[in-house]
Image (tube, coloured by chain):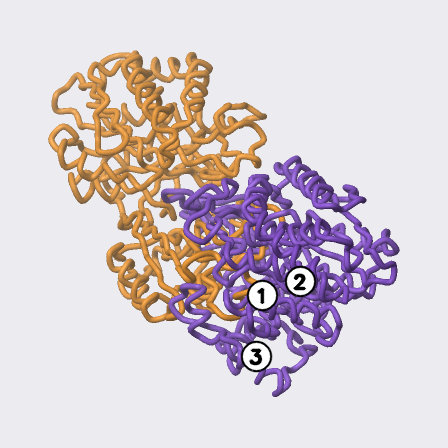
Chain colours: A orange, B purple
Amino acid sequence: MTEPRQQALEYVRRNRDRFLEELKDFLRIPSVSTDPAHRADVERAAAWVAERLRAAGAPHVEIMPTDGHPVVYGEAPAARADAPTVLVYGHYDVQPPDPLEEWESGPFEPTVRGENLYARGASDMKGQVMATIAAFEAVARSGPLPVHVKFLIEGEEEIGSPSLPAFLAAHADRLRASISLNPDAGMIAPDLPTITYGLRGLAYFELRIYGPAHDLHSGLYGGVVHNPAQVLCELIAGMHDAEGRVTLPGFYDRVRPLSEEERAELARLPMGEDFYLRNTGAPALWGEAGYTPVERATARPTLEVNGLLAGFTGPGAKTVLPASAMAKISMRLVPDQDPDEVYEQLRRYLEERAPRTVRWELIRMAGVRASLTDRRHPAVQALSQALEMVWGRRPVFKREGGTIPIVTQLQELLGVESVLTGFGLPDDRFHAPNEKLHLPTWARGIEALTLFFYNYGG
Amino acid sequence: MTEPRQQALEYVRRNRDRFLEELKDFLRIPSVSTDPAHRADVERAAAWVAERLRAAGAPHVEIMPTDGHPVVYGEAPAARADAPTVLVYGHYDVQPPDPLEEWESGPFEPTVRGENLYARGASDMKGQVMATIAAFEAVARSGPLPVHVKFLIEGEEEIGSPSLPAFLAAHADRLRASISLNPDAGMIAPDLPTITYGLRGLAYFELRIYGPAHDLHSGLYGGVVHNPAQVLCELIAGMHDAEGRVTLPGFYDRVRPLSEEERAELARLPMGEDFYLRNTGAPALWGEAGYTPVERATARPTLEVNGLLAGFTGPGAKTVLPASAMAKISMRLVPDQDPDEVYEQLRRYLEERAPRTVRWELIRMAGVRASLTDRRHPAVQALSQALEMVWGRRPVFKREGGTIPIVTQLQELLGVESVLTGFGLPDDRFHAPNEKLHLPTWARGIEALTLFFYNYGG
């Protein structure tokens, strides 16, 4: 290894405890982007990231307003003007912590138990943002920068990044880059460094069913009006057939079929039935007939009920016939499905199936296409080598079931491709109580990201 | 009219404004029996009733403990030892007021708008309890009592009266009566005084579906595990067939068929399609094929979803695959259905239909049989005449879709039949926001109850 690269790795090891303490500070800020009550916390998290980037050695850092939560933007030039430019993408916002009562320690009181750090955002993705800043600091403090580095750390990822497209369009010149490094994708296992080349898209809706003009006494009116909660259940039940397929008209028309080659590649991943049973704790698996679990979770579209609410849900027994019922319903999309078309398919389903005994309303909340990344890009190769150097084995390449809107947007709006990695693990409980980060994996991740900057700089 | 009866009616008219102010005091106490946070308020309501009964002229009043909320018991002897005994039943507890934001004025800030008094409990049933106490006071202040009067005012009606059976059994001797006067049944319209001779029973359940061990990210695991919210919807959707019939195995086996005579009688009530459309505001009616609306609402059994809860239900979009989902489900029963048998039918349905991809739990929350009252009882005749004297027309006799557990319990445990009436109207929004009481009807009701005491005393 050349001298600065070795120095940088030693810098990482020497400062690891400090990096962990800094991550805990970051995690103590409850930057829940979906909840207006946390607006000030979200701003506090942005300020924290900006300050931390400055301290790491970025000469230009600013907090840039958007129509929603601000973007933290930073720049650090390479020694050579013709070096490639890495645009680091991250987000400082987190999911809501509820249900609160299921957390063993407070969601915003980061706590180490065993090899793990527990807190909302530990894995998704404050831990990953901190790892990237730490790696950048190590490189910046160990000699001239081998690549130009730009940081784009947003505060709206968990609500579908509504302000980002306008932001990207408005600042396209400044954001120009050779690659976007996106550490928001996880690993398959602690010993399997992972590069993700495909992401599912997302279409998110709220469906509201309205029946009587007000809540009714179920004794006086039960049997005479169609209960909106029952109608909602009937409509949702009809959205899948007995084989686990989505029944919306035309839903599969634009789904790109999996090639035999890709199915063989996915079959080599250690993500069989046992993997999914272990990581979910479900009594049994379920899903679309004719596909393996990893295919269903990453390369096939799905429809999920994310929330249900109707009538009386407190303790006790209230004999109410509710006036309305609500469901949050989302679809994970694959190439080449279109969120607009999926919305129309759901509308058409409801028009065909909703009974005239109720009225309904369908609200669009997010729409992002799926994406696929070019695996031959030099940055992908540089990251692959960096991961191999730290873990001692070649990374696996996989498709991801989740959605990262920025990947699609950078491709569509700026022509910038993303290389996706990350050091979260499948049992990290992203979006759920007791989210955690595996600290030994995180420490390796910082080293791998450090090496990536050097490998890509050449 | 004899002299005391005329004096009593004048007493009612003279004191009407005071009775209304006293009712408002009563309504200001948020005696929500299902909510442990309101325990002290429930006790306050019991004390208010006891004090009010003493002031009305009951020589013996006490607050009697139960395993749950206390019973207010009062006694006032007739002049003649061999006079019949009226056991007045009422409840001082109320339903929860949520959703709070839909109230035009506070649920516990009684407000008169036009001819109506708005508050939780105004109609169900603090207004009815107050009417009965007012009538009793008028009779007690106008001469010797023509009947023995006992008061049994409980605090757990809205949670299914769990402590009442033990209370009735423990105090059977004291509670002996010729009839129970129960003013918790409403009227069909302001100009139609009503006596109710049939009540539906109730079986109330909470169904919980458990899938993965914890909430999952729907992007990572959507398509691989069976979503408990989806399973819940599928199970609920299967509980009715396309003709609105309940599909639980054996559900209709013990249902007593409606005779042609009774169908003809029900058809004469002014409760056709228009009545139900007007009182519910639903876009269209719905229900079991082959029966009229009034038959479906009062003399046929039903199954209702009273509440649904799963996953994320706040503002915004959270891509969670919930670990569990919950529904409150209740059935209205008719003679001769048995709540225990209905529980077994629901269990059997779930055993047959729930997929092995989830676990489930069924919690019993209430079970009350339906009841029918003897229309030839002298007290029923006395009440019928009293209503006719005030309204100038014979009352209608109807069956009621709601459930009043005390009626069944008094029949089964003490052999006491109930005569049911009341001065609530179909659009009073019992159990819903903006519950109200129609004050002119309420004032007539006080007069009718006053006359009932005299008519029954002979």
Q: Secondary structure at mark 1?
A: helix
First reached walking from the N terminus: tag 1 or tag 2:
1
Q: Position of residue A356 (x, y in %)?
A: 37, 70
| Residue A286 showing in the rendered view | yes
Whether marks 3 and 2 lie on the same chain? yes
The residue beneath circle 2 is B451
What kind of residue is marked 1? Val
Chain letter for the residue marked with disc 3 in the picture:
B
Q: Name the residue beneath numbered marker 1.
A: B390
Q: Same chain for marks 1 and 2?
A: yes
Percent position of residue B187, x then y: 56, 65
The answer to which of B216 and B140 lies nearer the viewer is B140
The disc, 1 or 3, on the residue closer to the chain's N-terminal end is: 3
Q: Which one is closest to the eye, mark 1 or mark 3?
A: 1
- The residue to which callout 3 is attached is B266
In three-dimensional space, the C-alpha distance between marks 1 and 3, rounded to whole angstroms, equals 24 Å
Q: Residues within 10 Å of mark 2 (few under 14, many from 20)?
A: many
The location of residue A94, given as percent across then percent down, is: 39, 33
Q: Is residue A212 left or right of residue B81?
A: left
In the displayed structure, does residue A37 sit left or right of residue B355? left
The residue carrying pointer 1 sits among few (fewer than 14), some (14 to 19) or many (20 or more) residues within 10 Å by Cα, namely some
